[in-house]
Image: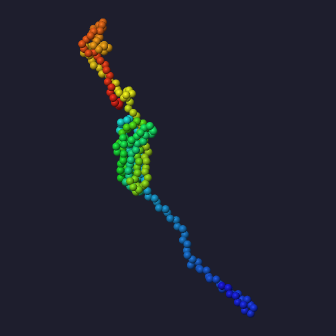
Amino acid sequence: MIAVLVLAGTLIVMVAPAHPAAPAAARPAVAAPVAVAAPVAVTASVAVTVAPSRHSTVIGARFTLRSQLTNPGSAPTGQLIAHLNVTSLTSDVYVDPEDWSSQRTLEVPPLRVGGTTLLSWDLQAVNAGRFAVYVVVLPVSGAGGDRLVVSPPMRVDVAGRRTLDVGGALPVVLAIRSHSGCSPSSPDGACGARSDQRATAPSRCGGACLRIGAARWSGDMP
């Protein structure tokens, strides 16, 4: 504060002191930053493997796929669903997985941390070609994670059964023995000489000659 006085021609200036600064102790303290550790995530996960990794078979044959589910996470899983799938590795073969296995969906109880469960799948090869068989695992709810897990595939090579002719028929020779000892080359009704006679001229005999015929048996060869 400044006051100016004029007395008898003399200028007098008086200066009042400003307000004193607040003592340092009265100032609010500023807290130093404190590092806070991030919480550790608690997650449940599933790893899936299959065995064997490769299989060769023929149409109609049955085989088994085994899958193993493991929880490598830090929390138990919820209820799980395991689903079996079959896919052709060539575009010219249509696959209906229902024809390969009648039971393709299994319910899996919750897995504890580090827990393991084994599943067995029975299949029958109904198509010839090259195929991939694999298992997909997904949670029933979000309690065990919200993503599905796909196993590595088992490669399956299926060969067709071989037949003896194009029509899939096996020729079968049927022979009817003649009780008269006639020659199989004789025409109907005419027989050759008996084995203990000279073949001077064909003679006619009443017995039936040996006849050779062919029958067809349909079906696949093993």
In the rendered image, which quarter contains the N terminus? Answer: bottom right
Residue 83 visible from this viewpoint: yes
Q: Position of residue 106 (x, y in %)?
A: 36, 48
Question: Total label count?
Answer: 0
Q: Residue at x 38, y 49 (%)?
A: 82
Q: Where is residue 64 in the image (x, y as percent from the top left)?
A: 36, 41
- Report the residue that reaches farthest toward the right: 9
Q: Where is residue 69 in the image (x, y as percent from the top left)?
A: 39, 49
Q: Nearer the viewer, residue 196 or 100?
A: 100
Q: Position of residue 84 (x, y in %)?
A: 39, 45
Q: Quadrant of residue 165?
A: top left
Residue 40 in the image: above or below residue 135: below
Q: Which residue is drawn at 72% across and 90% down?
A: 6
Residue 45 in the image: above or below residue 126: below
- Report the residue that reaches farthest toward the bottom: 8
Q: In which quarter of the image is residue 187?
A: top left
Compared across the picture, whether 87 is left or right of 218 comes to: right
Residue 104 in the image: above or below residue 204: below
Compared across the picture, whether 195 is left or right of 13 comes to: left
Q: Nearer the viewer, residue 219 or 27?
A: 219
- Report the residue that reaches farthest toward the top: 200
Q: Residue at x 35, y 27 (%)?
A: 169
Q: Residue at x 25, y 14 (%)?
A: 207
Residue 111 visible from this viewpoint: no
